[in-house]
Amino acid sequence: MEIFLSFGLVTIETYCFMKLAKAYFRLNYSENKTSLIIVLFSNIVNILVFPAITVSGSRIEKTFLAITFFFVILIIFYEGFWIKKFFLAGIFYLLIYAVDYLGTYIVLFFSDVSLQEIYESKIGFIILSCFSKSMLFFICMIWTKKYENARENNQLSFIEWCQLLVIPICMILNLSIVVYESIKNNTLSAILLLDIILLILSTFSYIFLEEKTENRKKIEIENIILKNKMKEKMVQAEIIKKNFESQRSMTHDFQNHLCVLQSLISKNANEDAMKLLNQLTMETKENVQILRTGNNFIDAILNFKYTSCSKENIWMIFEINNLSNLSLPTDKIIVILSNLLDNAIEACLELESERYIKIKFLVGKDIMLSIKNTTNRNLISKDNMMTIKENKILHGYGLKNIERAVKETGGISTVNCKDGWFQYTILWTCC
C-alpha cells in the first residue's frame, strides 16, 4: 500500500514539474517516451536514494538533493539556459514545500488531531497527501496556462540570474526555519498561516517579476537590433541610390558612346570598337536599370535586388504603377521592402529550379505591397517562419522588423503559404 501511495505521489509531482518545464523549455526527445522515462526515473530515485537521505541527512542536504534532482532532469531532457533551469528547479521545490505545509496547516487547523497522529494514521496521511498534491496540481495548471508561451531564449545575463536567485534561496530558508519548526511543535497561529500564504504568493509574484524582466531585456535587444538594421538599410539605400545615379549618368552619355562606336566601325577600327563595346557591356551589367517607379529609393532597391537575383538565376516579375506620390516614410518602406526581398531571395536560393519572385506595389486609393516567392518551406504562420533561421537569439527579427514598421505606418499584413508559394501582403488604407 505504501509503495503504491509513494508511486502515485511522486508521479503527480513529476507530472506537475513536466508541465511547468514544457511551458518554459523545449524537449530534446519525443514527449511520450520522455514523460515515461522521467516518471520511472523519479520513482527509482525516490525508492533508492531519498530514504537514505531521510534517515541520515539534514534538511539542507534534502533540499539540495531535491533541487539537484529536478535540475538534472531539465539538463538531460530539455533545451535552454542552465541557470534558468536551476531557477525553475528551485522555485518548483519551494512550491512543493509550501503547498505540503499549507495542506498540513489546513488539516491541523480544522481537526483536533496532532501532526504525529496524522502521520501515524494511514488514512489521515493519505487524505493529507491527496489534498496537498491536488492543490499542487491545480496551482501548476494555472501557472502553466499563464506562462505556456514562455519558451523564449534567455535574455538575462549570468549576473542578472544570480541576483534573481537570491530571493528564492531566502524564501526556502524562511520556509525551512519558520514553517517547519512551527508545524513540528503543533503550534498553529494566524501568523504561520499568513507566512505560508505569502510564500506561495511570493512564488507567483517572483515568476511574474522574472517574466517581466526577461521581456524588458528582450525588448531592449530588439530595439538595438532594429536600430542597427535600420541604419544598415539606410546606408545600403544611399549606396544603391548613388549607384543608380551613376547608372543614369552613364545612360545619359550612352548616345556619345554610340557615336564613337559608329566612327570606329566606319574606319574599320574593329578591335578598338570591340574593346569599347565590351567595356560598356560590363558597366551596363553592373548598373542595370530595369524599371522606374517615380521613387528614387524604391527604384534603387528594386534594381539592386534585380541585379543580385539575375546572378542567382532568380526571375523577378513586377507589377508596379507610379510611386512618386507614395506617402509612406522612406526609412520604414526601406526596412519593409528590403527585408521582404531578402527573405524571398533566401527562400529561392534553397530551390534548385523554379526560382520566382513576384512583386506587386500599387498606389491608388489604398496602398498595396505584395511579395510572393516560390519556396520549399511548409509554413502556415508568421511564427513558423521565425523558426527557420538557425541563430536562436536573432532569428525572426527580420520579420519582426517588418511587422513593427507595418504597424507604425498603420498597415495591415497577412501571410499565406501553400502550393509551393509564400506570400506576404501589406495593405495601407488611405482615408
Image: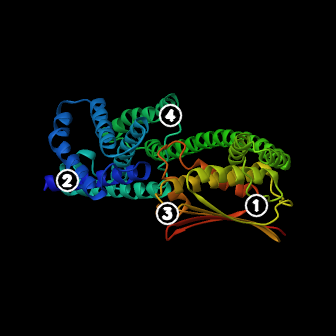
Left or right relative to 352: residue 398:
right
* Residue 53, quarter of picture: top left
- Nearer the observer: mark 2 or 1; the answer is 1
Left or right relative to 133: residue 422:
right
Query: Could you classify mark 2 by the number of other residues whose Cα lies within 10 Å: few (under 14), some (14-19), or many (20 or more)?
Result: some
Q: Nearer the viewer, residue 107 or 237?
A: 237
Mark 4 lies on a secondary structure that is helix
Q: Are marks 3 and 4 in contact (CB under 8 Å)?
A: no
**Residue 430 seen in the figure:** yes
* Residue 321, quarter of picture: bottom right
Left or right relative to 55: residue 200:
right
- Nearer the observer: mark 3 or 4; the answer is 3
- First in residue order: circle 3 vs circle 4: 4
Left or right relative to 174: residue 61:
left
Three-letter code for the amino acid on which mark 1 is drawn: Gly
Three-letter code for the amino acid on which mark 2 is drawn: Phe
Residue 379, numbered label: 3
Residue 410, numbered label: 1
Residue 164, numbered label: 4
